[in-house]
Amino acid sequence: MTPLEGHDLRLVTERLDALADPIAIVSEDGAVLARNAAFAAAAGTMIQHHLSPAMKAMVLSLILRGGGSQRLVLESPEGERVYDVTLLPAALTGTVGLIGGGREFGGMILLRDQTLDAGLRNALTISRARYKEMVEISSDFAWEVDRNGCFAFVAPQGLIGYKARDLIGRSAGELMDPDHQVGPIIPFLSPTPLHRAEAWLIDANGSPACLEFSQVPLMNREGEFVGARGVCRDITNLRFHEAEASESRARERTLSRIVRLFRREAAPEAMIQAAASAVTHGLSGTGCQIFSSTTPQLRGVSRPNFVQEAVFGRAGTDQEIARVTLLLQEAEDDDGVVCDEINGRRFMAAFAEYGDRLNGVILVWRDYGRPDFTLAEQRLLVSIGGQIGVALEQLHNHRILVAVSRTDSLSGLLNRRAFYEDMQRRIRRLARSRETGALMYVDLDNFKMVNDTRGHEVGDEVLRRVAEILKGNTRGTDIVARLGGDEFAVWLDAADDTVAIKRADVFLAASAVLRKYSGSPQAPLMFSIGIAVYDPVYGEDMNQFISRADAAMYSVKQRGKGSYSVAPAPQGGRSS
């Protein structure tokens, strides 16, 4: 046994300092006999000139075991440090025996700093655990496919309704939606990385699903494709919402354009006609028809009758229109829109509504070979139906106002202003056609006595009966009016004095029913009728013409009433 003397320790220390790795010589009781600068600089290993408690405890343990290696984690001011501690016992170093002071030589300590390596390993372990947790809780779908495009891994939550176990081993290409396939390479098998690429698949329920892909291809050392892994996110609802918003914006633009076009027209009839044109072009049709209801009804209460108000382009036949309106009225669709085909022509029809009433129908046609009407176009027509419904209501109200302004409220006949306006148009037409027409002034004789003796209610009844007699004994092309009080007028289209005289005889005969309303037997109700024939060859103005009829009527009164008289032709004879 060779004791290690003090001068030898100095020599050992000098030699240890020449080594880069941390090395120390310790006694059997864990005291440091010699160390190099690297050992002294190792953080956490020493406190002043002594081993730190944790280090000393491990060294003593290794001495008792006869040497070996063990990992030690130490705390230091710089943070946690990780060391692999190796003890070479005295027998292996060739240095045995007593050291000064009676201490036995314990061995040589070698340190290897594994802090960085341990940190990387720990970080990798944590990263893997975190990745696994993130994959499991993420809304994204993680997956991996092999070189054949079959799923080798699918996150536990599965993919677009499929369970993970149902996809393992299945070809990813089977999930692609053929109606939305835009290229020969599917995202799962892309040889280049993808970032937020989109593709459409078919989900477990058979419905289209839009996924956003991010993936990286997997290559072997030879650069061959051996698979791919990535994540995808279901953005189907987002795309549907975007499509609906885009469709809504397009529908609003088209609707605004159509409404703007037909509202440029001031007259209600022209507005409806402009609407038929605008709808045809706005919906890429070949024809459009707009109908109004003669009796607007609540939806589902009854089946209203429709009359055509406007047509543009190629319209449908009466049989086709009848079929369309029947299908529309029977439609269970809450939107009240029907798309179908008749005789090779596609059509789309919808109700026009005002308030809670159906007041019309819009019918759009497309010829054979044109595409079907889309759902967006159907929704647009329903929106247009509301606007057309307002226009039809305006047309209906306009006609009521016109009728009121032209009609005598008691008798229902035209009033004086409307009669003269219509008669003036007729006279202008006669000037072009070179035909004749007749004006009959009818005065109710002894009417004042009826009001005086039997009251105004009976007098009003008499006036209504006179209107019935005159209206019921004229043609649809003739005009009957109450000029005021007990004076009436009748215009006979395309008539001469012969026709007028025959009509006067009919009126006089029919007036016999009025006698029961007379105020006195000595003053019976009768007609005095003055007749004037208009012949355009005379160049007579309207005032002269009316004056001749009026004078003829008064000549009857002067002769005793209850008869008729024909006014002579205008003075001066016929013009050449």
Image (cartoon, grey):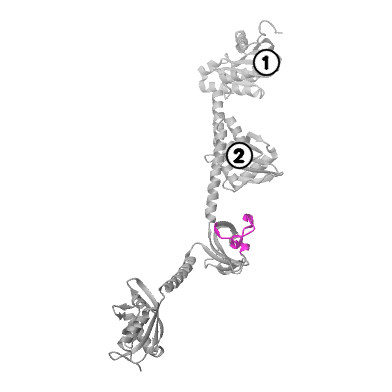
> What residue sits 35% from the left and 71% below the top?
79
> What residue sits 29% from the left and 91% below the top?
102
Q: Point out the tag, 1 or 2, that comes first from the N-terminus.
A: 2
How many C-alpha atoms fall within 10 Å of the one at disc 2: few (<14), some, or many (≥20)? Answer: some
Q: How far across and how far down the image is residue 287, in percent?
A: 66, 38
Q: Quadrant of the N terminus?
A: bottom left
Q: How far across and how far down the image is residue 133, in percent?
A: 47, 68
Residue 277 versus residue 230 in the image, above or below: above
Residue stretch in magenta: 172-196
Q: How far across and how far down the image is residue 150, in percent?
A: 61, 67
Q: Amino acid at mark 2?
A: Gly
Residue 179 shown in magenta: yes
Residue 41 shown in magenta: no
How many C-alpha atoms fall within 10 Å of the one at disc 1: few (<14), some, or many (≥20)? Answer: some
Instruction: Choose between 482 and 309: the one closer to the eye.
Output: 309
Q: CA distance from mark 1 to mark 2?
A: 44 Å
Residue extending farthest to the bottom is 1
Residue 329 versus residue 58 in the image, above or below: above
The residue under label 2 is 282
Relative to 59, 284 lies left or right? right
- Label ID, residue 431: 1
Q: Quadrant of the C terminus?
A: top right
Helix, strand or loop at mark 2: helix
Relative to 519, 506 lies left or right? right
Instruction: Choose between 197 and 442: the one closer to the eye.
Output: 197
Q: Amino acid at mark 1?
A: Ala
Determine which quarter of the picture holds residue 485: top right
Determine which quarter of the picture holds residue 359: top right
Task: Confirm whether residue 270 shows in the render.
Answer: yes
Relative to 142, 326 lies left or right? right
